[in-house]
């Protein structure tokens, strides 16, 4: 678990990838790596998710995880494809339990104190805060972090270059999830140079606000 957290925390940026064509996965992984990132979350929002994870997992220098995981069966799909961690939009005891059985770090979505408490009870210390902006953004994370001092958050949803620094300034934020450097239109057009440019700019912006969170 700690190796996964350290890799994500090193840049504090976790791209959320929605890829329709698994054949583009190697180019995408190369573009993100060239921009300075070593991890990405590939969502199970397309039929190509498992194949995309498998292709990206072939790079020994890249950490690929599965996102939008809703069922234990998808946990198995992700694990069998080579995913190194799992992210879910909400807290599912069945998904968390299956991840733990498979030895996969899991970051379940949490929007309330009750859901965070459930994660803590399950032995977890990192949660996805989703959808971040719609739930109150930075102010809400500050409020939730006060009683849950050991919990780290990965806010996702509405995070962008305009508010990135505000989120990263919070000690409770491990990393932020976002799509701006891997926008579906860029991926569909194969604009890998632009993916690299946006990634490098984001990494540079995050580095100026970075601090140890692990």
Image: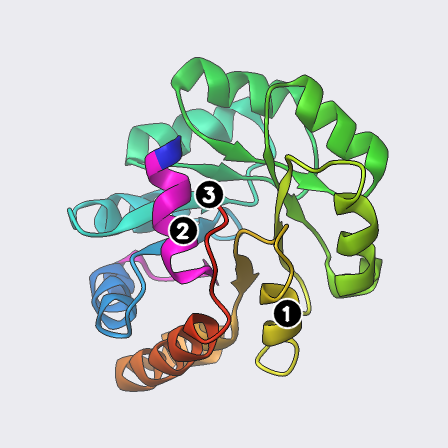
Residue 202 in percent (x, y) is at 44, 77
Residues under numbered marks 1 and 2 in contact, where contact means CB atoms less than 8 Å apart? no
The residue identified by callout 1 is: 159
Rendering colour mode: rainbow
Corner quadrant of residue 151? top right
In the depicted view, which residue is nearer to us: 181 or 112? Answer: 112
Task: Between label 3 and label 1, give the one nearer the viewer.
Answer: 3
Mark nearer the N terminus (3 vs 2):
2
Is residue 25 magenta-colored? no
The residue identified by callout 2 is: 8
The circle on residue 43 is none
Mark nearer the N terminus (3 vs 1):
1
The CA distance from mark 1 to mark 2 is: 16 Å
Is residue 7 magenta-colored? yes
Q: Give the range drawn in magenta.
A: 3-22
Residue sitting at x 50%, y 46% = 44
Q: Residues within 10 Å of mark 1 (few under 14, many from 20)?
A: many
């Amino acid at each position: 678990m700690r190796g996964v957290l350290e890799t994500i925390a090193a840049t504090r940026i976790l791209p959320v990838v929605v890829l329709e064509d698994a054949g583009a996965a190697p180019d995408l992984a190369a573009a993100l790596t060239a921009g300075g990132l070593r991890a990405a979350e590939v969502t199970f929002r397309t039929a190509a998710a498992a194949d995309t994870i498998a292709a990206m997992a072939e790079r020994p220098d890249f950490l690929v995880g599965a996102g939008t995981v809703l069922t234990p069966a998808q946990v198995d799909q992700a694990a069998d494809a080579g995913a190194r961690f799992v992210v879910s939009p909400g807290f599912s005891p069945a998904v968390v339990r299956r991840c733990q059985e498979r030895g996969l770090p899991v970051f379940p979505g949490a929007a309330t104190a009750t859901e965070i408490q459930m994660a803590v009870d399950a032995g977890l210390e990192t949660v996805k805060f989703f959808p971040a902006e719609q739930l109150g953004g930075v102010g809400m994370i500050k409020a939730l972090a006060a009683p849950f001092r050991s919990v780290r958050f990965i806010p996702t949803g509405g995070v962008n270059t305009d508010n990135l620094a505000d989120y990263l300034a919070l000690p409770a934020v491990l990393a932020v999830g976002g799509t701006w450097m891997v926008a579906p239109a860029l991926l569909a057009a194969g604009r890998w140079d632009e993916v690299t440019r946006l990634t490098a700019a984001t990494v540079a912006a995050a580095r100026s606000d970075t601090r140890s969170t692990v």
